[in-house]
Image (cartoon, grey):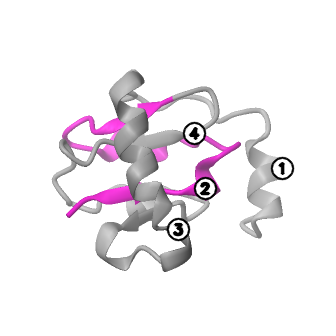
């Protein structure tokens, strides 16, 4: 099993989750983060750190978000590891508000 970053991360890219990851399984592009399922050790430390509830355990992934498992798996192959906290995107606050988290 693995954890999966979903669409709530898009436009936010909060990196609180990467700061607690013990195995550097997060990768990122200009708009969001992704989890490498081959590296993730299923510890769950990242889940409570995400302020927009974008991270799910694969086993609890809602059906309407299941496509994100393969998106994460594909995207990490071409993106750099993100293993340190960074500033969220300029659009993060607006995106979090739109999602109902602020």
Magenta segment boundaries in residue numbering? 1-28
Look at the picture and state if 65 lies above or below 69: below
Mark 2, other Cα within 10 Å: few <14 / some 14–19 / many ≥20: some
Q: Earlier in the sequence, mark 1 or mark 4?
A: 4
Q: Is residue 2 magenta?
A: yes
Secondary structure found at label 2:
helix
What residue is rendered at 73% in x and 44% in y? Answer: 92
Secondary structure found at label 4:
loop
Mark 4, other Cα within 10 Å: few <14 / some 14–19 / many ≥20: many
User: Does residue 94 appear to the left or right of 17 in the view shown?
Assistant: right
Rounded to the nearest whole Å, what is the CA distance between mark 2 and mark 1?
15 Å
User: Does residue 11 appear to the left or right of 39 in the view shown?
Assistant: right
Is the N terminus in the top left, top right, bottom left or bottom right quadrant? bottom left
Between marks 1 and 4 in the image, the one whose residue lies nearer the viewer: 4
Provide the residue designation for mark 2. 7
What residue is rendered at 20% in x and 60% in y? Answer: 43
Where residue 31 sits: x, y (%)? 64, 34
Tags 3 and 2 touching, CB below 8 Å: yes
- Residue 32 numbered tag: 4
- Residue 65 numbered tag: 3
What residue is rendered at 43% in x and 42% in y? Answer: 34
């Amino acid at each position: 099993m693995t954890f999966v970053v979903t669409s709530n991360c898009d436009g936010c890219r909060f990196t609180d989750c990467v700061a607690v990851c013990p195995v550097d399984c997060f990768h990122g592009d200009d708009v969001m983060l992704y989890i490498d399922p081959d590296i993730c050790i299923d510890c769950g430390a990242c889940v409570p750190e995400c302020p927009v509830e974008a991270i799910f355990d694969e086993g609890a992934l809602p059906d309407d978000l299941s496509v994100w498992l393969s998106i994460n798996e594909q995207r990490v192959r071409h993106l750099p590891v993100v293993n340190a906290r960074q500033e969220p995107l300029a659009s993060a606050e607006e995106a979090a508000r739109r999602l109902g988290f602020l």
